[in-house]
Amino acid sequence: MPTRYSIETCPDDAKVLHMKLNEAAENGGRVVNVIWQPEREFTNREFPDDLKVWVESGYIIILEYFEQDPANER
């Protein structure tokens, strides 16, 4: 059975995270990993003077979905 993966981002809010995890489960997704990242300053070296950007804390959700094969369904 082929699988596909999806990556979702979520703000640092437990209620929003809970909602996104429930939504993924309702759509047939399986949570592979949830990663929390703290707020940080990011230096973008593609811009002149190494532009600094502030990134807020949040979650990265890695999901796995199983693709259904219509030939195997009854």
Image: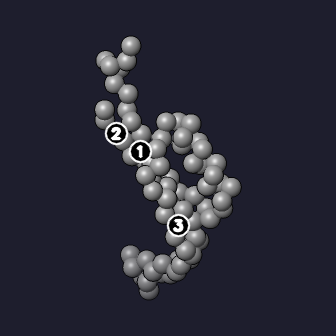
Residue on which the image places disc 1:
64
| As drawn, 51 above or below 67 | below
Question: Quick one: label 1 or label 3, which is nearer the N terminus?
Answer: 3
Q: Which quarter of the figure is the N terminus placed in? A: top left
Tags 1 and 3 in contact by the CB under 8 Å rule? no
Q: Determine the residue positioned at 59% across, 48% down.
A: 20
At x 39% / y 79%, what residue is drawn?
Answer: 45
State the residue in front, 31 or 56: 31
Q: Residue furthest right?
A: 15
Amino acid beneath label 1? Glu
Outermost residue toward the bottom in this view: 49
> SS for tag 1?
strand
Residue 40 drawn at (x, y percent): 53, 78
Which residue corresponds to the image point at 53% horizontal and 36% vertical from the top-left?
27
- First of labels 2, 3 by sequence position: 2
Q: Residue at x 62, y 65 (%)?
A: 12
Task: Categorize mark 1 by other alpha carbons within 10 Å: few (<14), some (14-19), many (20+).
Answer: some
Q: Which mark is residue 48?
A: none
Indicate the position of residue 43 as horizontal and vertical percent values. 45, 80
State the SS at label 2. Answer: strand
Q: CA distance from mark 2 to mark 3?
A: 24 Å
Give residue 36's mark: 3
Comparing 29 with 55, the one in front is: 29
Question: Element at badge 3?
Answer: strand
The front one of 53 and 61 is: 61
Q: Which corner quadrant holds the C terminus?
A: top left
Residue picked out by circle 2: 3
Give the Cα separation between the discs numbered 1 and 3. 18 Å
Q: Dot 3 surroundings within 10 Å: few (below 14), some, or many (20 or more)?
A: some
Residues at discs 1 and 2 in contact (Cβ within 8 Å): yes
